[in-house]
Amino acid sequence: MKRHLQYFLYIISIVSLILVVMGNRTTEAMSGQKAGSNSFVIPKGTNDLAKMGSILQAEDILLNDWSYYAREHITGMQNMEEVQDYAKELQQKFPDWKWSVTNTSQKWQVTAVSPTSKHHQETLQIMATHTKQPVDAYIVYSVRGSEWNKVTEGFFTTEKFRHRLSDIFRGEPTVFSCMKGVFNDKIDTALAKRAGKVMSDFDAKEIEALKEENFMSVSASSPMFTGSIDHKLHNMNLQIGLRSEGLGGKTTIVVGTPIITIEY
């Protein structure tokens, strides 16, 4: 158990580092397209959740947690006042969301949460440090739900969602998608076998893995997903984690691209 906790804390540290690195690589390649919402292009990876859902449900996996996470490093702002003005503009666009501000000696952050929805919850965050000039700021938009079906899948193809991204982001955000579920079957199957079948479904090639009797984590590369993280000599863009509660217990699976962003 202690080993699992240490590994989990290690994964969280690595994920945090990767998010920062990937955020810093985000460019304003789409800024010229922001003049009108009709010219806005949906970020790469936005349909990855649909791909995951289709494959996992075909494996008779009951999906009970999913998340869409888009993150952009805000460039071109010289001071905190400009970041706060940007936040005020967004607040005017989403007046029915619940807004809150946190301000410390190190960081200023504004968080907005969408009104309660039957299918999902949306969250918007703008974060900026007090310690750098020009200011170092990020904007994060996330959508999370506990059930994946045609209605939730359809949300990501609506004009409402398209306009949401166009209103929030200045350039092209980096997208992270993640799904968590439980195998419905009661057959006591080895984790390696379950992982191998899912890997095959994603046409994925293993890069590295941690394999134990009741816990398994695999980093891989799949042609199904466009995003990637430079990993030694490979481009990793898929992570799969499985945890078993033992003989007769449930088996949980988490799949993320390019990395897992849901606790398991």
Image: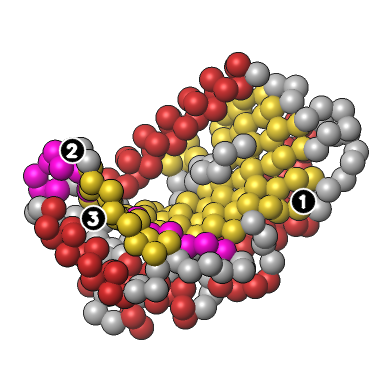
Under circle 2, the secondary element is loop
Is the C-beta separation of discs 3 and 2 under 8 Å? no
Q: Residues within 10 Å of mark 1 (few under 14, many from 20)?
A: some
Q: Which quarter of the rendering shows the C terminus?
A: top right
On whether residue 260 falls in the magenta region, the answer is no
Q: Is residue 92 left or right of residue 245?
A: left
The CA span between labels 1 and 2 is: 46 Å
Q: Is residue 84 left or right of residue 11?
A: left
Residue tagged 1? 61
The CA span between labels 3 and 2 is: 20 Å
Determine which quarter of the picture holds residue 231. Answer: top left
Residue 123: x percent and y percent? Answer: 43, 59
Q: Which residues are magenta?
A: 120-135
Amino acid type indicated by mark 3: Ile
Question: For this rendering, which residue is in front, 46 or 185?
Answer: 185
Q: In the displayed image of the protein, which residue is found farthest to the top?
A: 2
Asked if one can make out residue 173 in the rendered structure from this viewpoint, the answer is: no
Q: Residues within 10 Å of mark 2 (few under 14, many from 20)?
A: few
Q: Which quarter of the rendering shows the N terminus?
A: top right
Residue tagged 2? 105
34 to 188, vertically: above or below: below
Residue 77: x percent and y percent? Answer: 13, 56
The CA span between labels 1 and 3 is: 38 Å
Under circle 1, the secondary element is strand
Residue 198: x percent and y percent? Answer: 72, 44
Amino acid type indicated by mark 2: Ser
Residue tagged 3? 74
Mark toward the viewer: 3 or 2:
2
Residue 260: x percent and y percent? Answer: 54, 42
The colour scheme is secondary structure
